[in-house]
Amino acid sequence: MNEAGGVTTAVRGDGEASADEAPVRPMRADAVRNRRLILEAAEEVFAAQGVSAPIDAVAERAGVGVGTLYRHFPTKEALFEAIVLTRLEELVAAAAAGAERDDAGEAFFSFLRTFAGKLSNKHDLIDALGAEGIDIKSQCAGMAGDLESGVETMIRRAEAAGAVRDGITPKEVLGLVVGLCQATERPEFDGVSRQRMVDVVCAGLRPQA
């Protein structure tokens, strides 16, 4: 290891020198817990008050100090990004798990309800990021492909089980639920209304007599 001009460098196995990087340490359990609480609180606050809600309100709802919140998310945009990306990661995992369940039909319809729940009230966050020049959709492209693949598997398995009508595609299904969630972001709709609308979508996807 050499030091030149105050910069520590390490010699790689191929003889090239590179800046010495400290290993990434996993977050402590309390830090993981605080991050989760902040994300959950932020979703609730932004859903109730809109994306202009103050960060102080998020910290108060989460039960953490403002300094703790900023250590996890230095800007409001970083918090928006984390909400969108974290929920998409959870949806990808839910789709993968659903694709392996034995009860193919129930797995598919259960996933649609989960999808609608996690997607609700996220459109304003995406718009706010876009207004700041942050293309969150490009960041999500890889995970969106994984999500579509998982939904495709669930659809085909549910078709084989006779639980959904033939010929539907992942894009059609996801488009239906995305459109539903955007529509129900208006103030005249609540969670109960959204759930009823999801039930209507699910009924329409079942085989017709």
Image: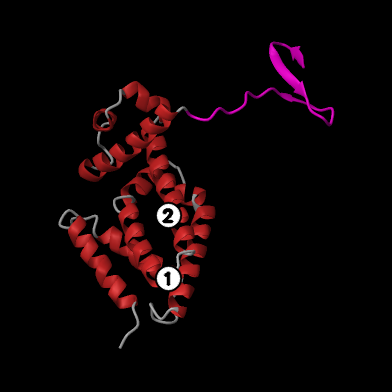
Q: Amino acid at mark 2?
A: Leu
Q: Which residue is mark 1?
A: 104
- The quadrant holding residue 132 is top left
Q: Is residue 23 left or right of residue 34?
A: right
Taking depth in this image into account, of 19 and 127 the one nearest to the observer is 19
Left or right of 29, for residue 19: right
Camera-near label (1 vs 2) is 1
Q: Residues within 10 Å of mark 2 (few under 14, many from 20)?
A: many
Residue at figure coordinates x 45%, y 47% from the top left: 136
The magenta segment:
1-27
Q: Which residue is mark 2?
A: 91
**In the rendered view, does 172 fall on the left or right side of 120?**
right
Q: Secondary structure at mark 2?
A: helix
Seen as rendered, the residue at the extreme right is 15
The image quadrant of residue 81 is: top left
Q: Quadrant of the N terminus?
A: top right
Residue 72, given in percent of the width and then of the height, sits at 41, 29
Residue under the image location 35 percent in, 38 percent down: 39
- Identify the mark nearer the N-term, 1 or 2: 2
Q: What is the x, y in percent for residue 108?
A: 39, 67
Instruction: Name the amino acid type tagged 1.
Output: Ala
Nearest the camera: 103 or 127? 103
